[in-house]
Amino acid sequence: MWPEAFAIAAAGFAAGMINVVVGSGTLITFPILVLLGYPPLVANVSNNLGLVAGGVAGTIGYRREIAAHRGFAFALLPVALAGGLAGATLLLVLPSSAFKAIVPVLILVGILLVAVGPWIQRRIAARTAPASEADAVAAPTAEAAGIPGGRGRRVGIMVSIFILGVYGGYFGAAQGILVVGALGILTTVSLGSLNAVKNLLVTGVNLMASIIFILFARDSIDWAVVGLITVGAGLGGLLGARVGRRLPPTLLRVIIVTVGVVALVNLMLHS
């Protein structure tokens, strides 16, 4: 019992830190829960609730960067929430057998996204002008007033965030990488600021999905798992916002991909 509890809390800690720094922490906690014998739907729902604490901690840690782009961030937040609501609803409406069947595909997609994450980030960095954290906080930006660009670009940004919100409400592995990638392509916001906005949007999606699960899917919630992940993810989110940016991203990605591959193989062998 205690080794299992420690493993879940440790996975929550790692996921909370990774979500703030890179994204895709679900590929740590969800596979661990499945490997420990939890049904995929219970693992997904309980994991979603538990990771909210880490997202909140990370968002608070990035509050200065978010404040510098508050108009941009808070204009997209309702769109992300709507997507999260739709995704969580789909998870509950579709039969659990459908989720179990699609989980290996979702994990594989998440692993691939983590693997190509550095390439996505390099492309984004090449398109955006470098800016120091002080400049991002002190200098007024166009994004502070709302979603930048013409009407077509604004629609494209909102549609992308809604779709990614649906994905996040349904499963969410590597959702953060997708959000950063989409906003990096469609805006000229610096990579550091995009990471901060990503934390706010992904946390909002997880929170919305959690509300739906608590209201309509209590039978799929393991509250002991939620509590362990909440404590771990909260501490991990605080650490990620403070010092996680100094950790080698390659190491984090190797860990994520390794755990994801082990879980994928386990699911395929037992399906």
Image: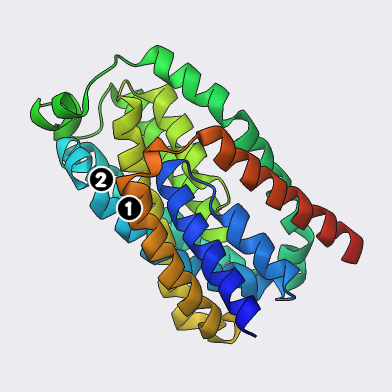
Around disc 2, counting alpha carbons within 10 Å, would you say few (fewer than 14), some (14 to 19), or many (20 or more)? Answer: many
Mark drawn on residue 187: none
Mark drawn on residue 62: 2
Residue 110 visible in the snapshot: no
Q: Is residue 100 left or right of residue 146?
A: right
- Provide the secondary structure element on which disc 1 rests: helix
Q: Is residue 78 above or below residue 159?
A: below
Mark drawn on residue 58: 1
The Cα atoms of the two marked residues, 2 and 1, are separated by 6 Å
User: In front: 149, or 270?
Assistant: 270
- Provide the secondary structure element on which disc 2 rests: loop
Image coordinates for residue 197, horizontal then vertical, percent? 31, 41
Q: Is residue 197 left or right of residue 15?
A: left
Q: Is residue 141 left or right of residue 185?
A: left
Q: Amino acid at mark 1?
A: Gly
Q: Is residue 52 above or below residue 64?
A: below
Around disc 1, counting alpha carbons within 10 Å, would you say few (fewer than 14), some (14 to 19), or many (20 or more)? Answer: many
Image coordinates for residue 135, horizontal then vertical, percent? 15, 24
Q: Do callouts 2 and 1 mark residues in contact (Cβ within 8 Å)?
A: yes
User: In front: 156, or 16?
Assistant: 16
Image coordinates for residue 106, horizontal then vertical, percent? 69, 50
Q: Is residue 35 above or below residue 60?
A: below
Residue at x 78%, y 53% (from the top left corner) = 262
How many callouts does the rendering have? 2
Image coordinates for residue 151, horizontal then vertical, percent? 30, 26
The image quadrant of residue 152 is top left
The image quadrant of residue 195 is top left
Q: Amino acid at mark 2?
A: Tyr
User: In front: 114, or 88?
Assistant: 114
